[in-house]
Image (tube, rainbow, N blue to C red):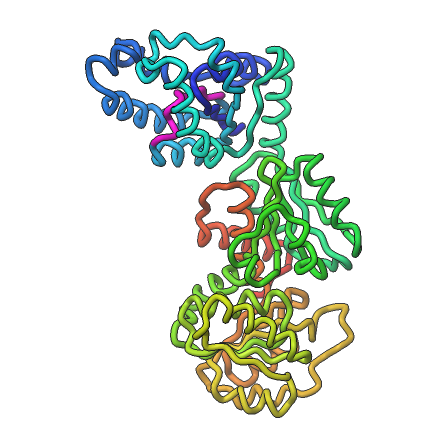
Amino acid sequence: MDNIVLIGLMNSGKTTLGKAVAARLGMDFFDTDHYIVDQVGLSVFDQFQHHGESFFRDRETEVAEFAASRKNTVISTGGGIILRPKNMAALGAAGRIIFLDRPLSKLLSDLDTSYRPLLKGGAEAVKSIHRARMNLYRKYADATLLNDGPLEEVVTELAELIHTLQNPKFAIIGDPLPACLASDIHLAALRHYVPNPTSERVQIERGELPAWLDRVRQENYQGFEIKTPHKLEIASYLDELSIEADLTGSVNTVVNRRGRLIGHSTDALGFFLALGQKGIVPLDKRVLILGAGGLAGSLALHAIQEGADRVEILARRPEQAHQIAVAIRSQNRSAPISWGDMSPRALQNSAPRTDILIDTTPLGMEGIEAQWSDMSFLSALPKSAVVCDLICTPPKTAFLEQAEALGLMTQNGIDTLIYQSLISDHLFLNRDMDYTAMAEIIRETLLQKGAADE
């Protein structure tokens, strides 16, 4: 089982609750302050008095790294452990972090400040530290528990919270929800970081999003991924949007942070990370995007941010492509973006001046009747161009087959899906991931299932 790291102000209950919940769950217990006292041979107060705060903070960093090497342990930390990002990086990589939030009034009524080196100023000192640290506790916590009740009740709540963190629930929603590889990809990655993750596929029809979001909060889903047609509609129901999701109005990943639902757009970053594995980056490239859905906007924005020489969007509904361009130019007036209709003539005209061609349309997708009627414009692409299709099923569409027959480099939707899913998992778990290593593990998993092309 992963470690559980308890953070919070002094007297918030980290040691008392930590010991009790460790005993209930059959876990070990480790107190960082007690360990430092044993190692140094002086109380925390005396360490501050004789050696200064920096001495103690250095010992705290050493013990944070030591504690992180433990397994199946509830770790109670000192109130200032969050002051050094290095401490939290070590502890966060080895477990789940819970902020024990005790009401300030109770902290003040119960706290003996006489042996606390930073609290010589009494109540005002406590209030000052409370103000200074609260944002850091919330920043680093995977979850928050309010310690505001009888001991046994709070221990039970803490045990239930730990169970939720150790057995996180995720979901993929859409309508319709076609067969997709995302569940396999998420689970292959998540199992390397948490013991028992589950990833559900839930069909959510139009109009059911508010009820679904209530369920996410009530059942403590860590987050969920969004397929069509909800990527645009869901944005208005969320508590917060990332910068890219806000600008494009498209959301493909929602993270649940203590009941606050935050929308992200990870598709474009996943696409360009996958493309980067082929040694291709948008810098100084001419990018042609076909289709004008939410994903097209994210791809256009990211390409421009990465220094693309020009981005052109062609769509059957050019007014949607125009809206994307207007949104991007509202943030960057000189953005090199243009738009137009996706007519055969427009495709033929744009192809010769394209380095990266990205098809975001559903043409060629399994279960979709509509197909490309004319792909002759592919012949007009430069021989150095790369042709990309974001469809996963089938792994190789007729569009990509035609491009390969012309000797062009291609990238299918599975490459994008792998990296996009990993970025979503990073957001779900709030911890760093080795994308390259995890991508290889996922590819092996998919190949064993016969789901990915060599």
For this orientation, the residue located farthest to the front is 124
Query: Which residue is at a point 49% across and 89% down the rendered structure image?
Result: 352
Reply above or below: 157 against 358. Answer: above
The magenta span reads 74-83
| Percent coordinates x, y for residue 267 in the rendering | 56, 60
> What is the quadrant of the C terminus in the image?
bottom right
96 vs 363, left or right, is: left
114 vs 374, left or right, is: left
> What is the quadrant of the N terminus in the image?
top right
Given residues 29 and 221, the one toward you in this image is: 221
Given residues 336 and 418, the one toward you in this image is: 336
Given residues 304 and 58, the one toward you in this image is: 304
Reply above or below: 19 against 283. Answer: above
| Percent coordinates x, y for residue 101 in the rendering | 52, 23
Say if residue 187 shows up in the picture.
no
Query: Which residue is at a point 51% across and 56% down the rendered structure image?
Result: 243
Reply above or below: 111 against 318. Answer: above
Query: Which residue is at a point 67% across and 88% down the rendered structure image?
Result: 374
User: Quarter-wise, where is residue 197 in the image?
Assistant: top right
Say if residue 381 shows up in the picture.
yes
Query: Which residue is at a point 61% across and 72% down the rendered structure image?
Result: 323
Residue 78 among those drawn in magenta: yes
User: Quarter-wise, where is residue 149 in the image?
Assistant: top right
Reply above or below: 180 against 118. Answer: below
Q: How many marks?
A: 0
Residue 140 among those drawn in magenta: no
